[in-house]
Amino acid sequence: MKAALLEKLNQPLSIVDREIPEPGENEVVIKQDYAGLCYRDILSATGFFPRIQLPIIPGHEIGGTVVKTGSEVRNFHVGDHVASLIYIPCGKCEYCRSGNENLCPYKKSIGEEVQGGFREYVNVPEISLISAPKEVDTRYLPIASCVTGMIYHALFKLAKVKEGQRVLITGAGGGVGSNAVQMAKAFGATVIAETTSESKKEMLEKIGADYIVDGNGKFNEDVKKIGGADIVLECVGIHTFERSLRSLNNGGKMIVIGNIKPDPVNLPLGLIILKGNTIRGSISSTRKDVSDALKMVAENRIKPVIGSEVSIDRINEAMEMMKNKQTEGRVLIKFS
Ligand SMILES: [Zn+2]
Ligand SMILES: [Zn+2]
């Protein structure tokens, strides 16, 4: 089978030929029609995550059909549709035991510390898997953890979004942002979408954004004019952070889920003290989040936004386009 391999940092991925893996005793082997391409893949190829083990098959957005199970696997069977977490939790610590495995300090990142998903057949430990309803299109399985499940965690579990609240989403044209627009709408929120790309505005309207603000200017002033934001889902980081904070109404919540550039941000403390605002980080998703997000897809409450499907042979081009903000919605890597 074909696999994409990162041999050295800051180099294009090489397309190599690999054996189909055998499952370890606690693992299953999944056949993927698609894998998800994430901005994190671009960051990790530049050495953003120091624990990366080279050479590695990157890719953490994994999902598909179980084709083989290890001798100790109990809960999954051949033919099951599954989505994978983007990490392998330890399963033993207090976080793992309380259903907060996204905070497990011992978790291993798939595609960075263990071989990842840019290959058609992937071996994944049972502890990272979530079973998916059969009515969910297989294109949506690989993005159930890092896109829909992660947004669910941030918006529903942490921000506790309620019907009628005003939610600002930054980087709304991207893979995470566009799916967040849709999910916030499904929770009954009024959605304000921030983008710097004129060309993405049409798509944002189509998926239900109530207002669109231009990230090239002082969008916080535009957001204030239309009533401010009760919740900000910050998907970008340094470029939008301060203006996002200034967009919040008193007692507002900012949930930070994305950071495309690893530089420190400017944080005027008055904006959180005097306005009683909260800033909270959100990391990844738990198995329950992924399962709940998959249910929303199965019930047609959300229809994940897929921008394009690119063959594994062209993965480097797709990464370059994503880096240059030329992609809309989530990019899927195709294996056949
Ligand atoms: Zn991802
Ligand atoms: Zn743990």
Image (cartoon, helix red, strand yellow):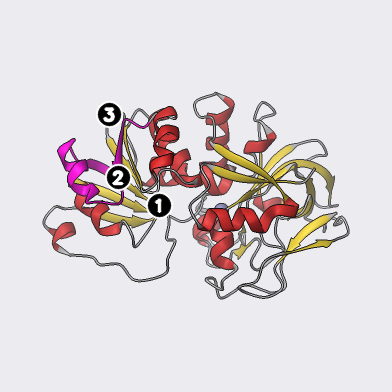
Q: How crowded is mark 3: few (under 14 residues within 10 Å), some or many (20 or more)?
A: few
Q: Residue furthest top?
A: 299
Indicate the amino acid at tag 3.
Answer: Gly
Identify the residue position indicated by label 2 in the image.
214
Q: Up-down: is 74 above or below 314?
A: above
Magenta-colored span: 209-230
Residue at point 70%, 41% (across, down):
82
Quick one: label 2 or label 3, which is nearer the N terminus?
Answer: 3
Residue 101 makes an appearance in the image: no
Q: Which residue lies furthest to the front in this view?
A: 199
Identify the residue position indicated by label 1 in the image.
235
Q: In this view, does 83 lie to the left or right of 289?
A: right
**In magenta stretch: residue 149:** no
Residue at point 49%, 60% (across, down):
103
If the image is split into quadrants, where does the N terminus sit?
A: bottom right
Give x and y (percent) for residue 235. Answer: 40, 52
Task: For ligand 1, tell me if the residue under mark 1 lies within 8 Å.
Answer: no
Residue at point 66%, 59% (across, down):
316
> Is disc 2 placed on a helix, strand or loop?
strand
Give x and y (percent) for residue 175. Answer: 51, 45
> Is disc 3 placed on a helix, strand or loop?
loop
Indicate the amino acid at tag 2.
Answer: Asp
Give x and y (percent) for residue 321. Answer: 56, 54
Q: Could you say which is closer to the camera, residue 131 or residue 254?
A: 254
Indicate the amino acid at tag 1.
Answer: Cys
Q: Residues within 10 Å of mark 2 (few under 14, many from 20)?
A: some
Give x and y (percent) for residue 137. Answer: 66, 31
CA distance separating discs 2 and 3: 23 Å
Residue 310 makes an appearance in the image: yes
CA distance separating discs 1 and 2: 15 Å
